[in-house]
């Protein structure tokens, strides 16, 4: 009976959770960040390897796949590999999951398909990641000293803080429809980083572009091939229709 009650709670709570997810306002990834922009993808790769790959593996992605981004094997070896692994190896990390659980409370997730897993009715996985990377702020109550507007009480520290700077979450009241007042929370940059806000947003967008690429490296090739397949099917449809007309002309 208890299990039935739990099941009913889940079934009735699911729509409410879906509606709440739709109400989350995500920042949209800049439209000029395109999946076929090799410069953006190369920069995103560099940021990922230098700032993310220390804790977050990409266990379903191989280094040599980065050649699709216009990089040579020598460039990958010289600029993106800092350990003794080979170019054909998977992008794994040396951190032990048990140690990670002790240090962070939970092992850092693999990021190979993070962009695809974060897609929701509120927006794409790219929008979610872009909002997340821009939403860190100082919070002394947290063990790491950081919190996130999109992911409250996140265990991850802000690894890009030297680039972005330190933000604070400020609250203010403003007039709302109906003559009432509402409290609005917004992020304020208190200590600038080495990059300007515009430069940091662009860097975050390039990193997200690479994370999206990792989720499906063959996406661009699939889309281009799909266009040719549809054109071929269109030609075959015309031929098949002409054959049908010729075959049934004496009947109709």
Image (spheres, rainbow, N blue to C red):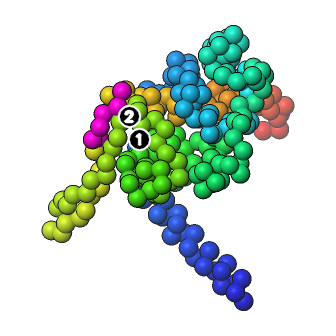
Quadrant of the image for the N terminus?
A: bottom right
Residue at 35% in and 31% down: 193
Residue at 61% in and 35% down: 54
Residue at 27% in and 41% down: 190
Which residue was labeled with disc 1? 134
Q: How crowded is mark 1: few (under 14 residues within 10 Å), some or many (20 or more)?
A: many
51, 171: nearer the viewer? 51
The reply to whether dot 1 and dot 2 touch (C-beta < 8 Å) is: yes
Quadrant of the image for the C terminus?
A: top right
**Badge 1 element:** loop
Q: Does the magenta stretch include residue 200?
A: no
Res 227 → quadrant: top right
Res 46 → quadrant: top right
Q: How crowded is mark 2: few (under 14 residues within 10 Å), some or many (20 or more)?
A: many
**Badge 2 element:** helix
- 162 horizontally vs 107: left or right: left
Judge whether 180 appears above or below 202 on screen. Answer: below
Disc 1/disc 2 C-alpha distance (Å): 8 Å
Residue farthest toward the left in the current orientation of the protein: 179
Closer to the camera: disc 1 or disc 2? 2
Residue at 19% in and 66% down: 181
Which tag, 1 or 2, sits closer to the chain's start? 1
Which residue was labeled with disc 2? 164
Q: Position of residue 2 (x, y in %)?
A: 70, 87
Q: Where is residue 3 in the image (x, y as percent from the top left)?
A: 71, 82
Q: Position of residue 239 (x, y in %)?
A: 76, 25
Q: Position of residue 26 (x, y in %)?
A: 42, 48
Judge whether 120 appears above or below 175 on screen. Answer: above
- Range of magenta residues: 189-195
């Amino acid at each position: 009976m208890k299990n039935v009650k739990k099941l009913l709670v889940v079934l009735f709570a699911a729509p409410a959770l879906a509606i709440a997810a739709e109400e989350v306002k995500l920042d949209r990834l800049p439209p000029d960040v395109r999946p076929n922009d090799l410069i953006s993808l190369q920069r995103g790769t560099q940021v990922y390897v230098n700032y993310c790959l220390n804790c977050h593996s990409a266990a379903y992605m191989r280094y040599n796949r980065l050649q699709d981004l216009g990089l040579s094997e020598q460039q990958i070896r010289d600029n993106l590999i800092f350990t003794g692994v080979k170019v054909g190896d998977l992008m794994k990390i040396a951190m032990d999951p048990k140690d990670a659980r002790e240090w962070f409370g939970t092992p850092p997730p693999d990021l190979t398909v993070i962009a695809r897993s974060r897609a929701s009715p509120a927006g794409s996985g790219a929008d979610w990641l872009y909002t997340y990377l821009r939403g860190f702020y100082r919070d002394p109550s947290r063990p790491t000293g950081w919190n996130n507007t999109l992911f409250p009480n996140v265990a991850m520290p802000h690894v890009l803080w030297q680039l972005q700077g330190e933000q604070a979450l400020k609250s203010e009241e403003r007039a709302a429809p109906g003559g009432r007042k509402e409290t609005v929370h917004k992020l304020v940059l208190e200590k600038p980083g080495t990059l300007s806000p515009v430069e940091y947003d662009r860097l975050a967008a390039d990193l997200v572009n690479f994370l999206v690429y990792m989720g499906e490296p063959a996406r661009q090739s699939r889309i281009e091939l799909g266009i040719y397949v549809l054109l071929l099917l269109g030609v075959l449809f015309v031929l098949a229709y002409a054959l049908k007309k010729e075959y049934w002309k004496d009947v109709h």
